[in-house]
Amino acid sequence: MLVAANKKRDAVSALRRGLAIFAVATAAFTGAASAQTLASLSADVGARIRGDAKPIAAWTTFCQDYAAECDVDRSEPSKITLTPAIWNTIVAVNRRINKSVEPMTDMEHLHVADRWDLAEDGIGDCEDFQLLKRHILAEAGLPRRAMRMTVVIDEKGEGHAVLTLITDRGDLVLDNKTNTILPWHRTGYVFIKRESQDTTAWVSLGGASSPVTTANR
């Protein structure tokens, strides 16, 4: 058990070193990362919070193993102020992780129904993509408090995880199914719940009954 724990810590340390280097390089990115531009985004409203919600069980386990990824620092801004440089960083990270992580369900990969992690071995399903994106963006200086893991029902009627960026242009969604960053209400998804911005907990978005897992690709 001790050997396994040490190997996990070493893997996480190596991952963080690599991500820190990538984040610095990405923050300097100024080219046209995609056809999307900051100017194409209009001011929009965010999703409405409708009370408390029960977290996904796998998120609770994730927070025990990666406490820093779940902590909420209320001194951080609650919204991201989008500038051309920040927008380019977000677009680049979204595209890079969507391309570099191999999509695979937890059952296929780890023989468990649902596990959340940072795709340390380069393989993951929907929530692993989004957690890795958030980790890199936080390393690049964006406030983690304004980047919330979110549970939705997707176009197949299945539980799915996306990353909501709460910005001065509204709530924008990073998704491993597309490189296009969309306002939350244009994704076609039913929004169920997301991490709170005020405490290590979840809040309801009122869309429907919550899925038990977010285990699809």
Image (cartoon, rainbow, N blue to C red):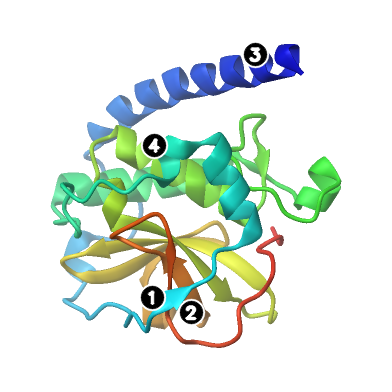
Q: Earlier in the sequence, mark 2 or mark 1?
A: 1
Q: Earlier in the sequence, mark 3 or mark 4?
A: 3
Q: Are marks 2 and 1 in contact (CB under 8 Å)?
A: yes
Name the residue tied to disc 3.
Answer: 6
Mark 2: give few (<14), some (14-19) or many (20+) Cα within 10 Å: many
Q: Is residue 33 visible?
A: no
Name the residue tied to disc 2.
Answer: 191
Does residue 40 sit above or below 19 in this rendering?
below
Place of residue 27 in the rendered image (x, y in percent of width and height, measured from the top left)? 25, 34
Does residue 155 sit above or below 162 in this rendering?
below
Q: Earlier in the sequence, mark 2 or mark 3?
A: 3
Q: CA distance from mark 2 to mark 1?
A: 8 Å
Q: Is residue 27 visible?
A: yes
Q: Are marks 2 and 3 in contact (CB under 8 Å)?
A: no
Q: CA distance from mark 1 to mark 3?
A: 40 Å
| Residue at 61% across, 37% down | 119
Q: Nearer the viewer, mark 2 or mark 1?
A: 2
Name the residue tied to disc 1.
Answer: 184
Q: Which mark is residue 136?
A: 4
Q: Are marks 1 and 3 in contact (CB under 8 Å)?
A: no
Q: Nearer the viewer, mark 2 or mark 3?
A: 3
Q: CA distance from mark 2 to mark 4?
A: 24 Å
Mark 4: give few (<14), some (14-19) or many (20+) Cα within 10 Å: many
Q: Is residue 35 left or right of residue 125?
A: left
Residue type highlighted by circle 3? Asn
